[in-house]
Amino acid sequence: MGWYHVAKSGKGMYLGEERKIVFQEDKLIPYLPTKDEAIKIGEMSEEKLKDYDKWPIVQKLASVDYIGAYYFNEEDYFEDFHNRTIANGMHCCFEKRYGYPFGSFRSVSDYDDNVMIFCNSLWPPKEYNQNLAELTEEKLEKQLQEFLTEITGDLRYADKKLELCEEYDKT
């Protein structure tokens, strides 16, 4: 038996239950991390990333998420946890699209399969980033509405409001 506690939290949006979300993977292509960016993120070694450019979208997203990187070589992982892998890595695409530094946002399918994306920045940041410095709740809300509608094709995100997102962990 363990206790649940908030591991990370921030303002963002809940997308709903993982299995009910339809991601349009082709919409993520322009924002996928490059091989050099994946190396810099550091969840996988450069050696493991040698064929990165040939990988499908879901594998590229797994390579920048510590959970996906851990299970990367497990048989059937990408089939069994396809949506979870996209949910856990889509923050990289959001950050790249809007010019935020990697790690300033978090996307996750948590312990109860609830998908969320939220701002995970500590302030002040270690390095200055103009886009992050100019971020307001209003701007974040519009960017998330635009991004989530684009990558899912689901219009319910077009007017979704920001809320406090809490990623729980069990210890």
Image (cartoon, rainbow, N blue to C red):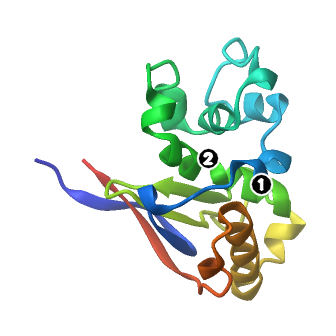
- Of the pair 88 and 157, the residue shown nearer to us: 157
Q: Residue at x 68, y 54 (%)?
A: 24
> From the viewer's perspective, is 111 left or right of 149?
left
Q: In the drawing, what numbered circle is on residue 27?
A: 1
Q: Residue at x 72, y 25 (%)?
A: 55
> From the viewer's perspective, is 64 left or right of 17?
right
For label 2, the SS is helix
Mark 2 sits on what residue? 89
Q: Percent x, y for residue 145?
A: 70, 77
Say which label, 1 or 2, has the lower sequence index.
1
Q: Percent x, y for residue 58?
A: 63, 37
Q: Percent x, y for residue 87?
A: 55, 52
Q: Residue at x 10, y 47 (%)?
A: 1
> From the viewer's perspective, is 158 left or right of 132?
left
Spatial CA distance of label 1 from label 2 is 14 Å
- Rendered position, 134 above or below 159: above
> From the viewer's perspective, is 119 left or right of 75?
right
Q: Residue at x 37, y 56 (%)?
A: 113
Marks 1 and 2 in Cβ contact (< 8 Å): no
- Of the pair 37 and 88, the residue shown nearer to us: 88
